Amino acid sequence: MDRGAVLDRRSNFILRLLLVAAIFLQSLCVAKEPGVAIQFDPNTPNAAVWLGYLISRVAYRTEHKLPMPQSGLIFSTFDEEVEARTGAAQIYQELKEKDRGLHDSYWETLSQIKSKGFMNAYVWTYLHQVNWPASQQPKNLSAFQGWSRSHLKNHKAITYGALGVEKK
């Protein structure tokens, strides 16, 4: 069997596993609150990593019992976003250990940011939302800004998928 077929089979397995986990986590969130819907295109590049990001967000919201809107998109809290990006970077690194040919510029950058200890500052700088309290501003923000001037030229944060609450 050729290497590409093995990697495709492994990627499909990981994606199916993550989809099952997403369905399981979604069912945990339905108790007394409206249900969380993971909005995601499985044809997204590096779908397993992005699905891991979304599952991390659902898990964070469930664990911390965060309130849900009545309907519409669920915007992440600062800590939720940091944890989800950190977890997704870890998923990417683990997949890359198994597949040395795996390369995604965005996740390579986030892996480097994670290893430098700058994930909080990255999220604050590139994904900041107006409802995040100023008290959560990372202490290493100026160090990150100095580092990012030479390491993140022309960088744009991306996000695939979203969480939402569907009207019942």
Image (tube, grey):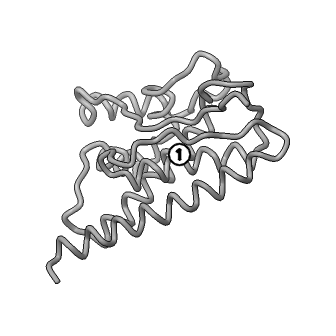
Where is residue 70 shown, x and y percent of the image?
74, 25
Residue drawn at x 36%, y 65% as measured from the top left: 12
Question: Does residue 119 appear left or right of residue 60 in this picture?
Answer: left
Find the residue positioned furthest to the bottom. 1
Find the residue positioned furthest to the left. 2
Residue at which label 1 appears? 54
Find the residue positioned furthest to the right. 32
Figure quadrant of residue 72? top right
Question: Does residue 157 appear left or right of residue 131 in this picture?
Answer: left
Residue drawn at x 40%, y 42% as measured from the top left: 41
Vertical placement of residue 47 versus 66, above or below: below
Vertical placement of residue 112 versus 92, above or below: above
Q: In which quarter of the image is the N terminus?
A: bottom left
Question: Does residue 90 appear left or right of residue 71 in this picture?
Answer: left
Residue drawn at x 43%, y 59% as measured from the top left: 91
Where is residue 43 shown, x and y percent of the image?
32, 47
Q: Could you say whether the residue bearing mark 1 is in a helix, strand or loop?
A: helix
Tell me if mark 1 has few (under 14), some (14-19) or many (20+) residues whose alpha carbon lies within 10 angstroms of its own.
many
Figure quadrant of residue 118? top left
Where is residue 67 shown, x and y percent of the image?
77, 32
Where is residue 16 shown, x and y percent of the image?
45, 63
Residue drawn at x 50%, y 60% as measured from the top left: 18
Q: Nearer the viewer, residue 91 or 21?
A: 21
Figure quadrant of residue 103? bottom left
Question: Does residue 129 appear left or right of residue 158 in this picture?
Answer: right
Q: Nearer the viewer, residue 75 or 43?
A: 43
Identify the amino acid type marked 1.
Leu
Q: Nearer the viewer, residue 166 or 142?
A: 166
Q: In which quarter of the image is the C terminus?
A: top right
